[in-house]
Every structure is written in C-alpha cells, then in structure tokens.
Image: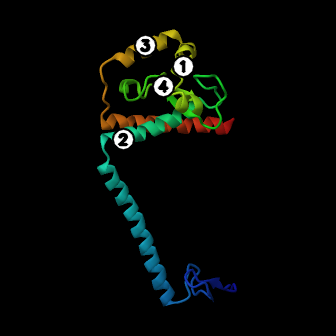
Amino acid sequence: MKEIKPKKCAVCGGEFIPSKTTQKVCDWSCAISLGHSNIQKQNAKLWQKEKKIRKEKLKTHKDYLNDLQKVFNEFIRIRDKGKPCVSCGCMVDGNGHASHFFAVGSHPNVRFSEDNVHVSCVECNLHRHGNLAEYSLRLPRLIGQERFDMLVVKAKQSLLKLSIPEIKEKIEYYRNKIKEMKKEYDGI
C-alpha cells in the first residue's frame, strides 16, 4: 500500500491526511465554507451574464454605432500599421488616428467606408483638423482616382441609416478581420 501524503486544506491552509484522493479540505466546517464560496462564485458568474444581457437590452442605436466606430477604427489602425500619415506623409508613432476624409457628422453614409478612413498622425488629425488640403491631394494617389471618385459620389448620396442588426453584423465582420490581421502580424 502507498503511503498517503499530507495535503494542504483549500480553505484554512492547514495540513491534513486525506481519507480520499479527491479530498480538498480537512474537516466539515472547511467543507461547508468551500461549498459556500463555490456557490458565491457561481452566483457571481450568473450575475455577470445577467448584467451583460441587461446592458445589451438597454443599448440604443447610437451606442451600437459607437461600438462599431471603436472596432472600425482599430481595424484601420491595424490595416495601416507601419504606413505614413495620409495627410503629411510623416511616419506615424504608435497607433496613430483613424482619420476620416469626409467627416462622420456631415457624411454618415461613408463613415465606415474603408476608402474614406486612413491612419493619420495626431498632429494632422487633431491639431490641423485632418489636414484636408494635403489629405485631398494624397488620397486619390493612395486609393486610385476611380475609387476616389466613387467615394465622392457615395458621400453626396442621401443618408444611409444602418439598422441595429446590420451594425452588429459589421462589428462581427471587423472583429474577425482584426483577429485575422493580428494572426498574420504574429506569424511574421
């Protein structure tokens, strides 16, 4: 017969000799405490799930658009990583900004157009309000004149409002693209 080695109690930390190999605690009082803590952990997990569901139900259309904007901007930063600022051509330190050629507020139908958004340095995007004079010269060279002309036409079209299911679909699409790109960068 094998000699039974002492174990440390999962609750009080005291040493004990287990009567079964799966025994985790030294006595009944510690077993009851362990049971209560396990129940509390399960309840905490259930509450987290419930809270997530409740938050989701309270979200407005604007909240979903903001979620999509965050994911989309992250996608742009990863896509354009290592590329120069679209406006001034300097190398972008860190992640840079996702700079919209056509502003989000006045042209919501191209807000999530990949041709409309490119990485920009903080100086151009924040302090020079996008540095649009330079942006307008460089963008046709970057995406091609035909795609630029299509972007201009699309920006002038009537307002396009995405439904919540469409927004959720786009969020999932860009999250998957981000995962793919991160895998590619990690593999390099």
Residue at point 42% right, 26% down? 103
- Where's the N terminus, which quadrant? bottom right
**Disc 1 or 4, which lies upstream in sequence?**
4
Residue at point 46% right, 39% down? 70
Q: How far, Cα to Cα, is label 2 from label 3?
A: 27 Å
Find disc 3 in the rendering and name its residue: 150
* Quarter of image, res 40: bottom left
* Quarter of image, res 121: top right
Q: How far, Cα to Cα, is label 1 from label 4?
A: 15 Å
Query: Crowdedness of circle 4 by 10 Å Cα count: few (<14), some, many (20+)?
Result: some
**Disc 1 or 2, which lies upstream in sequence?**
2
Instruction: Determine whether label 2 and label 4 are within 8 Å by CB.
Output: no
Q: Secondary structure at mark 4?
A: loop
Q: How far, Cα to Cα, is label 1 from label 3?
A: 16 Å
Can residue 121 be seen in the rendering of this structure?
Answer: no
Find disc 1 in the rendering and name its residue: 135
Q: Specify the label residue 114 is tagged with.
A: 4
Q: Amino acid at mark 1?
A: Tyr
